[in-house]
Amino acid sequence: MDPPGDAAMPGLGKSEPKKRKKGPRDFDWSKATFHHFVLKIAYVGTNYHGNAWQDPKICPTVEASLFEALLKTRLIQDRSSCNFSRCGRTDKGVHAAGNYISLSLRLKPGADGADAGEDFDYPSMLNGVLPQDIRVLASCRAPSDSFDARFSCLYRAYQYYFPHNGEDLELMHLAAQRFVGEHDFRNFCKMDIENVSNFRRRILSASVVNCGNGVAQFSVTGVAFLWHQVRCMAAVLLLIGSKLEEAEVITELLDVEKWPRKPLYEPADESGLVLRDCGFSDVSFAPGCPAAPAGDPSVTVACKSAEEAFTSMLQRHLRFAAVLACLAAASKPAGPAGDTGPKRHVPLRQRALCPSLEEKQQAMADKRRAKATAQDDAAPG
């Protein structure tokens, strides 16, 4: 008896046609129509390297997740053609309860495939595919094609939450009033000399209050902010509240003729910073604008329960971060020879200084000149 083999197994030697896997159906973008929209977004920034898009293969960002959702729902064709603009470019670990973006989104097609000219429920569509720590809270048609989430913004409002460890909050509040008005904040930021040459910014209001449960809050509203500006303001205020600095130091550091170089100090931790909201004169769900008429079809707001759930999650996260900060401070190792006392504070006005703006600009110009010379020397011929 022949051993079982391929010949004894009927049909094994015949090539059967493989079933082709169904891929995503091609989308006919030639039939799509678009309109310019404003979206209000919120996120817990702990797991993201900031809001602004970066290559997802390198690091996760809020915008990378947003664009992934926009492409998945086919509300945009690609990232480069959707006329995208962001209001607040928050840094790594920073949160937002009310950031805004503007972009062109696809409208709902008609029954015969033609343009129906109606809006999708954009918050529901996007929240269905976004991570739970990113939410679209509301959407509406932009008031004009020229509307830009960055340049049409009237003001940004930030809140910085910190563990209340006995700081004099009333003293901090009074000191914070020195920030109000238009000043040169080069000593209260991380200077981005490649993109910024004017460091004057206008602060509209500032306050420090006790939130209870061991947490306090520094609130500041301004027309625009510099890189790390709120965190640097908070860091100096915390030194004042701890009686390690006098309030006068704010006035001195705002005088850039007297202090052209920033003293070396670390900005406050990013985990307590929240972009609370942004003001627009013509966006119905933004502060600074009258409420939309009841039943206005141009406005789509995410269900209230979802917004409340996100706000609750953000508050829990901030309280947890404050508790961790308290624990970290309590568990710092002893100093030399068993010294358990606090580290000696060096007053800001006695610290080493960073290069001035002019020195940084000159160094950058020298670097570019050297690079251009090296390229010319390496050129053939």
Image: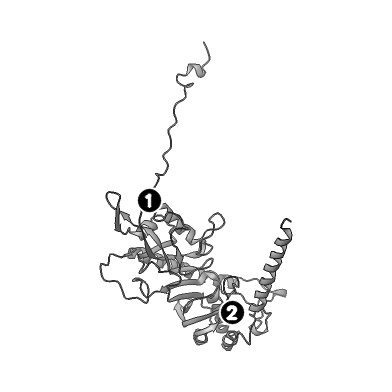
Question: What amino acid type should be assigned to the residue bearing mark 2?
Answer: Arg
Question: What amino acid type should be assigned to the residue bearing mark 1?
Answer: Ser
Q: Position of residue 259 (x, y in %)?
A: 63, 85
Is any part of residue 53 visible from this angle?
yes
Q: Nearer the viewer, mark 1 or mark 2?
A: 1
**Viewer-nearest residue: 196 or 123:** 196
Mark number, residue 3: none
Q: Is residue 4 above or below residue 192?
A: above
Q: Residue at x 39, y 57 (%)?
A: 126
Q: Which residue is mark 1?
A: 30
Q: Within 10 angstroms of label 1, few (less than 14), some, or many (20 or more) residues?
A: few
Task: Please indicate whether residue 251 sits to the left or right of residue 290 in the image.
Answer: right
Secondary element at tag 2: helix
Q: Is residue 6 above or below residue 30?
A: above
Say which quadrant the C terminus sits in. bottom right
Q: Residue furthest top?
A: 1
Q: Residue furthest bottom?
A: 248
Is any part of residue 315 visible from this angle?
no
Q: Position of residue 54 (x, y in %)?
A: 53, 60
Q: Residue at x 69, y 76 (%)?
A: 339
Q: Is residue 312 above or below residue 218?
A: above
Q: Are marks 1 and 2 in contact (CB under 8 Å)?
A: no
